[in-house]
């Protein structure tokens, strides 16, 4: 059995996927690299097959009809045989030194019988044209280099969210928790890092800059103007998170608070996209989203609505919306997100 399965969702990725794959090959026989060709129309399929032929004991090529990013992640997980599972998008890559350290630690944990459900590491924003790279690290939030539980988690600051880039999950836990991402939907990585959390018991944090998250490719889904154009999908994912878990039934207060905080930032992003669009139609969708949260979970609604960001996103009139946008821009600069 492999130690780590790595799923690479790939759609029309011929121009950049080789860098991603090459960065993962140093893992050798400890890993399986699952390239999921999601109905690409370029040379992605041929490149996937090329690597599978060249490294038959390491690389798998999976070909499917286009189902979107979520279905490609699902396909990777379905084909995973490793004890742990990691998603690396085809336009991103990993740092070799950090990668080998993580593999060594996972092997050590497995050998000791102290397997964790989630391993967390740092990621780096590789933003096009920016010399100074923003590192998202968690050393103030989690104990370092030790197995810990939710009881040991410290305070997570704004921006210190656990994202797909920073997590490696235990494969069987992902399958047992029933993770299934929706097809033909963007921004499902939020579901990927939210849904499994109540099933996570033991964790490990390594303070290494492992994942390199590339920002700047034309047409990338996280560009603001594209996100505004896909606001319906953002809101759909937001509602899925609202429906996903009754956080008030969670016994661990720190886990509950973190999941509420994640829901808060999702509500903030959906709201600011609606405000930035400057259309009455999208402002109506924003209002409906808040009403949806209120109808589904009034306790969470009150807590999030009364928070600083909740209040800021719901200031009345054009003047209020200008303040909302200004606050969001400041958060972008401070935190460094896109």
Image (cartoon, helix red, strand yellow):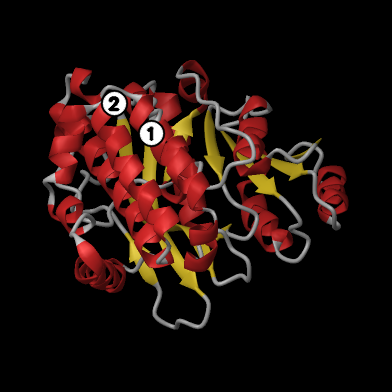
Q: Which x, y percent locates residue 66?
A: 75, 41
- CB within 8 Å, label 1 to label 2: no
Badge 1 element? helix
Quarter of the image for the N terminus: give it.
Answer: top right
Q: Which residue is mark 2?
A: 296
Name the residue: 64% across, 35% down: 71
Quadrant of residue 177 within the rendered picture: top left
Looking at the image, residue 215 sits to the left or right of residue 158; the answer is right
Q: Nearer the viewer, residue 37 or 296?
A: 296
Q: Nearer the viewer, residue 317 or 210?
A: 317
Q: Which mark is residue 272?
A: none
Give coordinates of residue 335: x percent, y percent.
28, 66
For the residue carrying disc 1, how many other residues have a C-alpha within 10 Å: few (<14), some (14-19), or many (20+)?
Answer: many
- Compared to residue 104, the image places residue 244 above or below, namely above
Image position, residue 145 (x, y; %): 28, 44
In the depicted structure, whether residue 335 falls above or below residue 270: below
Q: Position of residue 100 (x, y in %)?
A: 51, 50
């Amino acid at each position: 059995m492999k130690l780590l399965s790595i799923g690479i969702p790939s759609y029309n990725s011929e121009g950049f996927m080789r860098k991603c794959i090459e960065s993962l090959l140093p893992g050798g026989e400890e890993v399986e690299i699952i390239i999921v060709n999601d109905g690409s129309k370029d040379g992605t399929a041929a490149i996937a097959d090329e690597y599978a032929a060249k490294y038959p004991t390491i690389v798998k090529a999976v070909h499917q009809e286009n189902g979107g990013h979520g279905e490609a992640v699902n396909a990777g997980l379905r084909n995973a045989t490793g004890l742990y599972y990691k998603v690396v998008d085809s336009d991103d890559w990993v740092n070799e030194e950090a990668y080998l350290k993580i593999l060594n630690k996972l092997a050590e944990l497995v050998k000791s019988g102290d397997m964790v459900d989630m391993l967390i590491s740092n990621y780096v924003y590789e933003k096009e044209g920016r010399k100074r790279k923003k590192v998202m690290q968690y050393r103030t939030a989690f104990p370092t280099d030790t197995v810990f539980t939710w009881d040991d988690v410290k305070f997570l600051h704004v921006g210190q969210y656990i994202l797909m880039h920073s997590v490696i999950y235990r494969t069987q836990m992902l399958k047992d928790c029933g993770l299934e991402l929706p097809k033909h939907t963007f921004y499902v990585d939020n579901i990927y890092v939210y849904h499994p959390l109540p099933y996570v018991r033991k964790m490990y944090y390594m303070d290494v800059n492992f994942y390199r998250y590339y920002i700047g490719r034309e047409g990338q889904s996280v560009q603001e103007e594209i996100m505004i154009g896909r606001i319906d999908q953002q809101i759909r994912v937001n509602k899925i998170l609202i429906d996903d878990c009754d956080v008030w039934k969670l016994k661990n207060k720190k886990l509950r608070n973190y999941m509420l905080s994640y829901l808060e930032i999702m509500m903030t992003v959906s709201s600011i996209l609606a405000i930035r669009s400057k259309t009455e139609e999208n402002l109506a969708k924003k209002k409906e989203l808040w009403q949806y949260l209120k109808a589904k979970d009034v306790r969470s609604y009150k807590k999030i609505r009364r928070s600083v960001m909740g209040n800021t996103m719901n200031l009345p009139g054009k003047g209020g919306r200008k303040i909302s946008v200004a606050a969001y821009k400041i958060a972008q600069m401070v935190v460094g997100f896109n």
